[in-house]
Image (cartoon, rainbow, N blue to C red):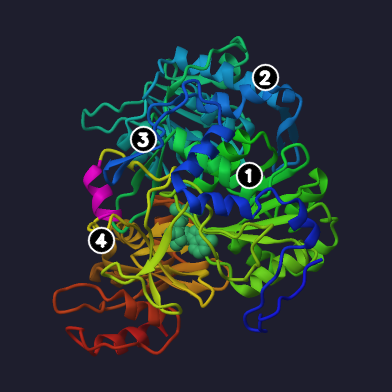
């Protein structure tokens, strides 16, 4: 049983690992000691122990041309072989790899042997469609087993996948397909969400439609999974049904070894400008850290555990902790297609009970929405199989942390609050559940082999208790290797700030407490975090000004009880539109418009129609002041405004 620790106070409680948990934990103190004794020797050992190398590497890290790192670079491996075939060859072919639960209630379980065969068939199909090493394949699918098979089939061929979240619009999809120069798109007719069949194929058709400017897209084929059975338009010659071609292929396919630094995937994420960045990850280092963290942070015992990460494969969490980490470790996991509250609010807890989930990894925003629905819903299910909970995406506030542990974790399960980013590829800061005394609200300690610091703008460490900027002070195996097609932006965004010291700048504010534990304080740039998803203010602003009624727009992230932050837009309309429409009508239209342009996650919670925006003398919008208004606070210092009366006008217009 756990206990409160000595020295902990009511406002700063700490929870020791349950004794029986600590006694059997996968990660003990020795890995911390090994890592601090020799960081590179530590990663070398992890990589050799956790992965199969066809050609073992002799070099661990080449950091001779920072910030371009090369890890294990003379080694060769096949990522898909590591996630599949080797488990079958080791006699674990009958172990379940995936328990799939569809939203309408259909379910399927695939063993490692079955998933391996499926991936081999898909790899054969993709080869037949002309996909080879280095080619890009865009994946736009719901959370179904075919999605996971698709990523692995692309990886098996040494090609590069670019997964686009199924909630993104045709425009967002097109921008990502174009930027990556994808040759093939894998999609489905649709997927189930909120009790409805929601179409995907039309967005692909629209994204690939003739541009009317004579420009040829790069996509040659579209492989289409039938999931919902809804009507689709068909482009003969380009489109291929999955069920026509995949089962017809033999389940044999030789996995070729590729160099450790062979690109594995591109994943687009929001930055401070309107254009999403294609974060590039490679193979050997990425897989090493994904597997290491999945095993040690989640205390994984692949023979016994049933692991469930609720993230969609459209996000980095789905890549590292649904696909690569768990499968490299031979875990049994649950994947769930739909929304948490369909057909009723207890759906997730039914899934936990049905499969006997032991390890559950989710986002604070989900925890907060369950809190709102009340504890009687989870309490009417048997959740006694759970032994470890995890959180990712944004800081988990202590109330939500405690509720999660008390109501979902029977008051005893450890919670690992994991800090990391699309760019870091895998977990960087987290408790290790068998050895760390947990502190609700703090992500706590860098994992073994990772070095972080909280510094001021000159790179000097700040005093304990003071806020500063979070940096990684040493390269790490799963670090991004670049931004697709834009090496300058890569250097500029992450490395220029502390170029003299070679630190990676994460874009997050943080502070260290008296014990040296890390507390995340949110983004320090114009990136918002809505329900754990990254959105850029600039991207939403450019969508808003693309509407004919908009003259000017400013977007801020305002605190929100459920989603962490919410998108709040301030819009100046063109005179002519205001004459013909009501402000409320246009505000509603603009909300919908942003949803169509980018995707429903970007839809503003509030659109305020205003007459002016607060600007400095040099014309920069002061978002800080708009955030004060959006959060209902007294407006802060307005001295640097060109016109100091603007804020009272805006405040009056908003109220
Ligand atoms: C935030 C998601 C506090 C942070 C894996 C980071 C967190 C951004 C945490 C990355 C956490 C993620 N505590 N903040 N445990 N985890 N963040 O790229 O601001 O979608 O920079 O990766 O989410 O979001 P991304």
Q: Which residue is painted at 75% across and 29% down in the image?
A: 95
Labelled disc at residue 497: 4
Circle 2 crowding by C-alpha within 10 Å: few under 14, some 14–19, many from 20: few
Q: Position of residue 555 (x, y in %)?
A: 35, 68
Q: Is residue 59 magenta?
A: no
Q: What's the distance in space between the residues labelled 4 and 2, CA to CA?
A: 48 Å
For mark 3, what is the residue?
Answer: 177
Distance of mark 1 from mark 2, alpha carbons? 21 Å
Where residue 19 appears, as percent x and y from the top left, is: 79, 61
Identify the residue shown where x is 24% and y is 90%: 645
Q: Is residue 543 above or below residue 628?
A: above
For disc 2, the marked residue is 89
**Is the CB of the residue bearing disc 1 within 8 angstroms of ligand 1?**
no
Q: Mark 4 vs mark 3: which is more N-terminal?
A: 3
Q: Which residues are magenta?
A: 486-495
| Residue designated by label 1 | 295
Can residue 492 be seen in this snapshot?
yes
User: Quick one: SS at disc 1?
Assistant: helix
Secondary structure beneath label 4: loop
Q: Disc 4 versus disc 3: distance between alpha carbons?
A: 31 Å
């Amino acid at each position: 049983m756990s206990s409160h620790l000595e020295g902990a106070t009511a406002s700063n409680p700490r929870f020791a690992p349950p004794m029986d948990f600590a006694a059997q934990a996968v990660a003990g103190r020795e890995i911390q000691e090994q890592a601090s004794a020799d960081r590179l020797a530590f990663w070398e050992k992890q990589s050799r122990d956790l992965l199969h190398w066809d050609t073992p590497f002799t070099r661990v890290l080449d950091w001779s041309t920072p910030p371009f790192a090369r890890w294990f670079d003379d080694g060769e491996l096949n990522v898909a072989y590591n996630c599949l075939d080797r488990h079958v060859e080791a006699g674990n072919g009958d172990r379940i790899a995936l328990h799939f639960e569809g939203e309408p209630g259909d379910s399927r379980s695939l063993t490692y042997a079955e998933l391996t065969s499926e991936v081999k068939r898909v790899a054969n199909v993709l080869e037949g469609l002309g996909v080879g090493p280095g080619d890009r394949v865009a994946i736009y699918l719901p959370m179904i087993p075919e999605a996971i098979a698709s990523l692995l089939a692309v990886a098996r061929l040494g090609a590069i996948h670019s997964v686009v979240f199924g909630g993104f619009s045709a425009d967002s999809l097109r921008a990502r397909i174009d930027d990556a120069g994808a040759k093939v798109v894998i999609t489905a007719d649709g997927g189930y969400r909120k009790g409805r069949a929601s179409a995907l194929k039309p967005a692909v058709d629209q994204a690939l439609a003739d541009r009317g400017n004579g420009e040829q897209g790069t996509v040659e084929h579209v492989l289409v999974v039938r999931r919902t059975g809804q009507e689709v338009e068909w482009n003969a010659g380009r489109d291929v049904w999955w069920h026509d071609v995949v089962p017809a292929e033999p389940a044999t396919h030789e996995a070729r070894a590729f160099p450790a630094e062979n690109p594995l995937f591109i994943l687009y994420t929001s930055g401070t400008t309107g254009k999403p960045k294609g974060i590039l990850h490679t193979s050997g280092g990425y897989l090493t850290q994904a597997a290491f963290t999945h095993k040690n942070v989640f205390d994984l015992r692949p023979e016994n555990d049933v692991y469930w990460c609720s993230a969609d494969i459209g996000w980095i969490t789905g890549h590292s902790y649904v696909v690569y980490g768990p499968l490299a470790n031979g875990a049994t996991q649950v994947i769930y297609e739909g929304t948490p509250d369909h057909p009723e609010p207890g759906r997730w807890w039914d899934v936990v009970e049905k499969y006997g989930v032991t390890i559950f990894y989710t986002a604070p925003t989900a925890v907060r929405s369950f809190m709102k629905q009340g504890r009687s819903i989870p309490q009417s299910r048997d959740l006694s199989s759970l032994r470890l909970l995890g959180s990712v995406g944004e800081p988990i506030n202590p109330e939500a942390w405690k509720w999660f542990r008390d109501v979902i974790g029977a008051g005893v399960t450890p919670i690992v609050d994991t800090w990391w980013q699309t760019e870091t590829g895998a977990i960087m800061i987290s408790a290790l559940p068998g050895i760390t005394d947990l502190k609700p609200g703090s992500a706590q300690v860098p994992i073994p082999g990772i070095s972080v610091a909280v510094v001021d703008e000159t790179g000097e460490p700040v005093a304990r208790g003071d806020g500063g900027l979070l940096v990684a002070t040493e390269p790490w195996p799963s670090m991004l290797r670049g931004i697709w097609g834009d090496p300058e932006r890569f250097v500029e965004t992450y490395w220029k700030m502390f170029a003299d010291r070679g630190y990676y700048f994460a874009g997050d504010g943080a502070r260290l407490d008296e014990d040296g534990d890390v507390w995340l304080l949110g983004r320090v740039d114009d990136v918002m975090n809505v329900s754990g998803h990254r959105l850029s203010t600039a991207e939403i602003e450019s969508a808003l000004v693309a509407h004919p009624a908009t003259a000017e727009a400013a977007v801020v992230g305002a605190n929100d009880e459920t989603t962490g932050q919410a998108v709040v837009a301030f819009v100046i309309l063109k005179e002519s539109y205001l004459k013909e429409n009501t402000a409320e009508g246009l505000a509603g239209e603009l909300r919908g418009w942003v949803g169509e342009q980018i995707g429903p996650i970007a839809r503003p919670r509030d659109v305020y129609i205003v007459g002016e925006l607060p600007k400095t003398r040099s014309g920069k919008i002061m978002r800080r002041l708009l955030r004060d208004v959006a959060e209902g606070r007294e407006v802060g210092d307005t001295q640097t405004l060109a016109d100091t009366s603007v804020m009272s006008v805006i405040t009056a217009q908003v109220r």
